[in-house]
Amino acid sequence: MSSELAAGWKARGATKPLPANPPAGPEAAPAGARRTLSLRAHLVLLTLLATLPVLAMGTAAAWHVAGNYREAFEDRLRDSARGLSLAIEAEIGIRLTTLAALAASPLLDGSAPDLPAFQLHARRTAEAMGSPVILLRDDLTPVPGTEGQALHPGALDAARSALDTGRPAVSNLLGEGAPERHHVAVAVPVPREAGSRMAVVARIDPGVLAAPLAAGATTPGSLAALTDARRRIVARSRDQQRFVGSAIAPEAAAGIGLARSLDGEDMFYALQQIRGLPGWRVAAAQPAAAHRASWQRPLLALGLGGALAMLAAALGAAAFGRRIILPVDALTRKARNVARNGDTLMGVPPSGVTEFEALRGGIAEAEIALRTGEARFLRAAKAARLSAWDWDPGADLLRGSPLLEEDAEGGPGAPARSLAAFLDLVHPEDRPLMREALRRIQDGETDELQEEFRLLRPDGSVRWLHSIGRAILRPDGSLREVAGISMDVTERVEGGRSRDALAREVDHRAKNALAVVQSILRLTPVGEPRAFAAAIEGRVGALVRAHSLLAEQGWFGADLRSLAERELAPYLPPDGAVRVVLDGPLLSLAASAVQPLTMVLHELVTNAARHGALSGTAGRVELSWRVGRRAGEDELVRLSWSESDGPPTEEAPGQRGFGSRVIDSTVRGQLGGNVQRCWSAPGLTCEIVVPAARLLAGGRPAPERSAA
């Protein structure tokens, strides 16, 4: 492929040979045939060329700023709509929660519910909600004693939905005619394990929902409205009684836009969906004039400021141009005077532009500065691991600076090589990439090369290079050479991979830790506050100890004995008495198993300290572990927790506690094992069996040896 590329470059250059004689430049034209412009005209053009791009950029920047103001206005409007939707959700949620609490009353349990007592409870709830509460049977007839005002058919539909789905239901706006007849029905099913189904139904006055809208729409001219799935107004921040039940305009269906309100005012609005109520939306609106003013005023201010700045720039350019033209005119008059009269006595007024007086000295200083800068660049390039290169396709020679040549055989100063020889130094996986990049330049698809590839060094190591090059053409369009630079980016690439791996590991560990803390907070029973706090503190402390042990081992796992010692350390007596015995081979746990096993041991230790062998002074605990090596037991790790000499526990408790549930769910769900418990006179015995693939580092047990 490389030889084909080289041949392609040669053919491209051969199809358009360079002309024998270059075309005559402007110097060859007769002086009288040329049209020239004065220095003053050139300065005017220069000023225009310098000013117009700035003016264009300023205009674009002003428009961008105006757009930012417009977007900020719209973002505030969206935020207002989201805030109002949350307030409406909370208002409706309070009533649904109240009805759910009423529906869950134990007075309705069993085949013969205590209706008189429930009616008293329902009347109190109705007084608190400001709405009658009706208990409906499965056939949507009210239970005797809870009858009230006849229910709207839409309220019955909501009750039927609650009974069929088992979830709370909210109707659309109900009622016709007078505003006081409008309402929204809410229904909550009664949770019953058997027997006929029932539902609790109440109504919400739209005025209740209008209160949070009015509280959120405090800006002058602002408006907030709540619409149901049929796009009828349920509540409004102002003129509630006037517009309740009215349908909104069809064009107000988008998320944000411009529409005319029901009272005839052009408003810019933002809509927000109400969670849990399909089709219900909250609209937050501001007058269209306020929306226009939010971006037109900054635009006008920026335009006026830009015009003043342009005027000041024009005046300054005129004054500065005069300082350049005057000495040139003086030199021109002096030269003409010398040519016509031979007068060399004519003086030239002094000028503030020293370049006219020190042109030759400036050129000499520029030459010295150029050589100094070139040497400085070479030193900086070597320090920055940069290298310059060029490739002559006609001769098929690739030349590079000493840095690039260090990567090839022969070291610095190695002769130029062909493209094929260079590609032999490129990593085999990256050679197709480089060939494709050169092919695209050859076919004229691009005139730039920018690739990152690996280079094989003579010692067998790999170095990452980032190369940037550009095709240089002859005047006739044929390719002369490709030149560019290469940068050693090995440290950046390798460092980036390490950072990515570390970031993924930290993200994974942090999510796991937060998930465990969340489950602890959710599942720990809330009883007495101090006991709840102590339980949370103990379980989070176990989690901290697990992560500390993992951090000490570089997050590669931990030793089972070390983990057990840390969990049992707080319960060891200060006098050195032997109350805890650990017995088992040295086992290296997988990193993913350290945290679950820590939580299991913490629950066992906590239970023993509260109710078992560690609750007294004479009790003993023995924790042992073995790896099954007999037929049918391979790849199984068995942990045994035995308590003795503690309080008598001859019978199993009547129901499992939270700690037992944590142990069961952790062993089965996270470790894929099983748990068996036995309560006897000496104390509790707990047997845990876990597959080695889920518990041990590498998934297999190491050769058994003592952990003493």
Image (cartoon, rainbow, N blue to C red):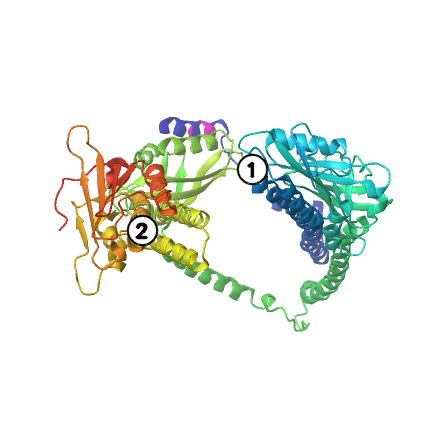
Any part of residue 489 in sight = no
Left or right relative to 591: residue 575: left
Which residue is more in the foreground, 690 or 122? 122
Identity, as a three-letter code, of the amino acid under mark 2: Asn
Q: Quadrant of residue 633?
A: top left
Quadrant location, the N terminus:
top left
**Magenta range:** 10-14
Q: Which mark is residue 109?
A: 1
Q: Is residue 679 above or below residue 385?
A: above
Left or right relative to 159: residue 608: left
Residue 424 magenta: no
Q: Which is closer to the viewer, label 2 or label 1?
A: 1
Residue 629: percent from left, percent from top: 15, 33
Residue 662: percent from left, percent from top: 37, 44
Q: What secondary structure characterizes most of the magenta part? A: helix
Say how many tags the image has: 2
SS under mark 1: loop
Residue 611: percent from left, percent from top: 30, 53
Q: Which mark is residue 440?
A: none
Identity, as a three-letter code, of the amino acid under mark 1: Asp
Left or right relative to 297: residue 412: left
SS under mark 2: helix
Residue drawn at x 59%, y 38% is: 108
Separation of marks 2 and 1 at Cα, in angstroms: 35 Å
Residue under circle 2? 607
Residue 479: percent from left, percent from top: 47, 34
